Image (cartoon, coloured by chain):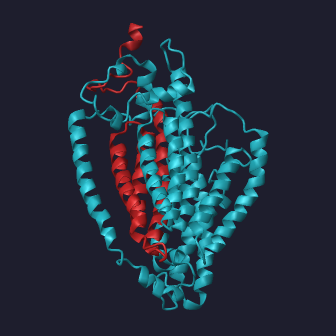
């Protein structure tokens, strides 16, 4: 009974948090609530006996995504703040971070402005700062939508989706479907003792292989956009306590990551969780300034980025001359191969996520790329 | 089946509010968060499908799919944020006054503003 109540409360809290994330007037508040949302999702996963996902969510959904969002928020504010103070010809003094934050949100999210959607918002006329912020953070150049038509279209879409979702939710009364029995019958051939790892790296290894491709494409995409021209954060240098703590924590995190990787063969854990935890160590080291952010220029930084996909692919192709199918491990070597692949995946995932956190090649603050000028070949510098 | 029914409906609401936020919110960061909420809702629905009972271990296949999905979601989020971080620079490089006079919202940088001042 108590657990049932707990589930109900947790589900309600998740919904409420999601609503506040979308509707909170302050963007910083909304990001922090999103991190809390990720943490509570991890609790929900463990209530649903999805312990692998709980681990991954705690490391990725709450930790890494939160760091990414906070980082981006700070960068956006510092760039837009610097823009408004340098290019501003009006006499408006540059606003502080909090009011910038508020100003950025002067355009209310739809759920809040539903009632007053038909009348044009009056406060957009006068806002020097506010409108400029909107301009910077909303999609630039996008044509404004006719409000009423857009809202009714969105409402129709939501109605259709809810009907389909209700249909889906009602299918959970038929629990005997699914592939669970097939997986459990073939566990002995899988080379590992944990069903989720068996599915990820053996039964459906193709998915995981392609996922590594997706990760690589994401990094290439983010790093191909040219150097980040945004100004550096108005600097509070990392305190000695933070630096000392990070120095202490980083080896410990690496150890935990190794354990999670090793444990993945027999219990919840594995390459994804280990890679996410390892990348958290990297993010901490970079944020504390102990280690310079990766530039992805030297070979020793590019190899770990590629090793997951390439080793996976090499194993998949390498078994074929022996008469096996693509990714069909030879039965004698299955366990070893899976562990080796997982190790390679862990390294790749960790460096991929760290590179995505850094966001792109740096550029010294004093040499901004001129507008409309193609990026120079060696405009990439370690900061 | 009493455990997941609350989560099933929660996932439904999460998906709906994710769609709503991704299409309706103005700020790009909030849209990205809305897409993540939408993703969380889908993951929750999949895991509810995988649930059997407190005593029977759940179906591992949806779990593996959700794990893959979480990692792909974070990389897509990071790519989106990386694009978002370039927007101010792009606007710096763009012509200072974009011709969006027909905008129903006021032009934040009207062409004649500086001359008037």
> How many numbered markers are drawn?
0
Quarter of the image for residue A376 reads: top right
**x then y, percent, for residue B44:** 42, 60
- With A135 as the anchor, is A34 left or right in this view? right
**x then y, percent, for residue A56:** 55, 61
Residue found 45% across the figure and 61% down from its top: A4
Whether A307 is drawn above or below A73: the answer is below
Asked whether the viewer can see residue A348, the reply is no
Front-most of residues A259 and A140: A259
Whether A40 is drawn above or below A362: the answer is below
Whether A81 is drawn above or below A380: the answer is above
Residue found 35% across the figure and 18% down from its top: A125
Residue found 43% across the figure and 65% down from its top: B3
Residue found 34% across the figure and 55% down from its top: B12
Task: Identify the colour of chain B in the image.
Answer: red
Quadrant including the C terminus of chain A: top right
Outermost residue toward the top in this view: B117
Outermost residue toward the front in this view: A1
The chain displayed cyan equals A
**x then y, percent, for residue B84:** 47, 41
- With A375 as the anchor, is A346 left or right in this view? right
Front-most of residues A367 and B43: B43
**x then y, percent, for residue A101:** 50, 29
Asked whether the viewer can see residue A61, the reply is yes
- With A367 as the anchor, is B114 left or right in this view? left
- With A326 as the anchor, is A289 left or right in this view? right
């Amino acid at each position: 009974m108590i657990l049932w109540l707990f589930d109900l409360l947790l589900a309600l809290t998740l919904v409420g948090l999601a609503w506040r994330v979308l509707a909170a007037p302050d963007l910083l508040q909304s990001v922090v609530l999103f991190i809390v949302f990720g943490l509570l999702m991890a609790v929900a996963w463990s209530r649903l006996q999805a312990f692998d996902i709980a681990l991954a969510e705690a490391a990725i959904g709450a930790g890494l995504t939160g760091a990414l969002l906070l980082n981006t928020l700070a960068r956006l504010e510092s760039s837009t703040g610097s823009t408004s103070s340098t290019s501003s010809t009006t006499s408006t003094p540059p606003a502080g971070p909090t009011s910038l934050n508020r100003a950025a949100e002067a355009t209310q999210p739809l759920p809040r402005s539903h009632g007053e959607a038909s009348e044009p918002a009056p406060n957009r006329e006068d806002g020097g700062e506010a409108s400029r912020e909107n301009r910077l953070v909303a999609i630039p150049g996008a044509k404004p939508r006719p409000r009423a038509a857009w809202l009714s279209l969105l409402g129709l879409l939501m109605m259709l989706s809810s009907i389909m979702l209700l249909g889906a939710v009602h299918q959970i009364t038929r629990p005997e479907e699914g592939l669970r029995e097939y997986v459990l019958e073939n566990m002995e051939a899988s080379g590992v003792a944990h069903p989720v790892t068996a599915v990820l790296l053996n039964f459906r290894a193709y998915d995981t292989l392609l996922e590594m491709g997706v990760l690589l494409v994401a990094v290439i995409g983010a790093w191909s956009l040219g150097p980040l021209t945004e100004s550096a954060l108005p600097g509070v240098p990392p305190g000695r306590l933070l630096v000392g703590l990070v120095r202490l924590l980083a080896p410990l995190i690496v150890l935990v990551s190794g354990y999670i990787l090793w444990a993945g063969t027999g219990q919840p854990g594995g390459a994804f969780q280990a890679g996410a935890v390892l990348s958290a160590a990297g993010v901490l080291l970079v944020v504390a300034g102990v280690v310079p952010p990766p530039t992805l220029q030297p070979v020793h930084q590019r190899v770990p980025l590629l090793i997951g996909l390439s080793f996976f692919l090499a194993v998949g192709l390498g078994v074929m001359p022996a008469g096996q199918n693509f990714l069909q491990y030879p039965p004698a070597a299955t366990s070893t191969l899976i562990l080796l692949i997982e190790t390679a995946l862990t390294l790749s995932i960790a460096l991929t996520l760290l590179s995505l956190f850094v966001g792109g090649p740096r550029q010294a603050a004093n040499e901004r790329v001129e507008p409309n000028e193609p990026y120079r070949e060696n405009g990439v510098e370690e900061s | 089946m009493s455990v997941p029914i609350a989560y099933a409906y929660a996932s439904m609401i999460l998906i709906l509010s994710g769609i709503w936020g991704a299409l309706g919110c103005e700020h790009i960061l909030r849209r990205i968060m809305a897409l993540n909420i939408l993703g969380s809702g889908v993951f929750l629905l999949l895991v509810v499908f995988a649930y059997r009972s407190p005593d029977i271990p759940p179906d591992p296949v949806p779990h593996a799919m959700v794990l893959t999905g979480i990692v792909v979601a974070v990389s897509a989020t990071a790519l989106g944020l990386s694009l978002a971080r370039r927007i101010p620079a792009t606007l710096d490089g763009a012509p200072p006054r974009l011709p969006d006079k027909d905008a129903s919202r006021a032009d934040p940088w009207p062409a004649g503003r500086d001359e008037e001042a």
